[in-house]
Image (cartoon, helix red, strand yellow):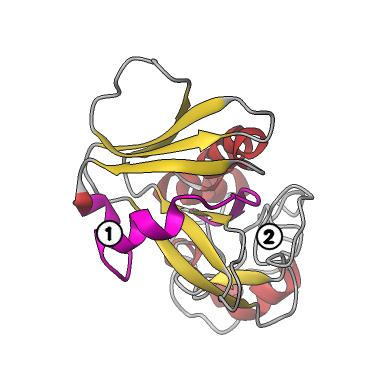
Amino acid sequence: MPELPEVETVRAGLAEVVTGAKVTKVVIHDSRSLKRHPASVGDFVETLTGRTLQAAVRRGKFLWLPLNKQKNEEQLALIGHLGMSGQILLRTPGFEADNLNRITIYLKAADGQKYELRFVDQRIFGSLAIDVMSDTNDGLPGGFSAGVTGPWLNMIPNQVAHIARDPLDESFSEEAVLKLFKKKQSGIKRVLLDQGVLSGIGNIYADESLWLAKIHYDQSAASISKASSCIGGGLC
């Protein structure tokens, strides 16, 4: 299952092409991959077609591409969640078909080149959706965008607002996470998997991090000190 490093790799791979790209056409091959889109399939296609993508942003396991605003409209974003087997692939026109391609978004990049953004998902646990963005609670950037800015910078899609910042986020606070640990009597692995405490960590990285830190998975999170924690880099 894709976790934070894999999702950041996807974000970075998309960013150069999608930033400033215009959506020229959208084709839905399997509407099940729109299960988190709050409106109809037709609404997804109509809303996205003709829009310009502003950036590629990430928090935890979520990716989003802010859309240019139309008059008197709330800020919207195209959200992607990979689930267990999802992929977001950039292809050039004429590239061979990808098996299990659920959605194709045709793009004209800022340099005029044409691309196809394909959402490929074997198990259909992942999804794409268009959602309204709201201001972040702390007034800081909603996610990591590698320095790309815009009026959407300090906003986050409503579907993502419930998860905490991830350890690769420039606004991530180790101290804030450790304070949350002190309130948790559950085992540290269970707490690491809680996306409301910190996001992006799944089963594999939780196990590997605890192994490297020599911390038992069932040790109470409240007992973890800064000296023995392994979050954000360099604290092990």
Horizontal side of 118 relative to 140 (left or right) equals left
Residue shown at 50%/28% (left/top)?
A: 115
Q: Element under label 1?
A: helix
The residue that appears at 76% across and 50% down in the rendered structure is 148
Residue 15: name its quadrant.
Answer: top right
Is 34 magenta? The answer is yes
Magenta region includes residue 132: no
Mark 1: few/some/many CA within 10 Å (<14, 14-19, 20+): few
Q: Residues within 10 Å of mark 2 (few under 14, many from 20)?
A: few
Q: Amino acid at mark 2?
A: Ser
Would you name the residue on which mark 1 appears? 42
How far across and how far down the image is residue 178, in percent? 67, 73
Image location of residue 46, percent across then percent down = 37, 57
* Image x and y of residue 133, in percent: 56, 72
| Residue at 68% across, 60% down | 228
Amino acid identity at mark 1: Gly
Q: Which mark is residue 228?
A: 2
Q: Quadrant of the N terminus?
A: top left
Q: What is the spatial separation of the Cα atoms under label 1 and label 2, in whole angstroms?
A: 51 Å
- Above/below status of 10 relative to 62: above
Q: Position of residue 10 (x, y in %)?
A: 54, 37
Q: Is residue 235 above or below residue 19?
A: below
- State which tag comes first along the sequence, 1 or 2: 1
Q: How many marks?
A: 2
Tell me whether the residue at label 1 lies in contact with that at label 2, contact meaning CB atoms closer than 8 angstroms.
no
What segment is highlighted magenta in the picture? Answer: 32-61
Q: Nearer the viewer, mark 1 or mark 2?
A: 1
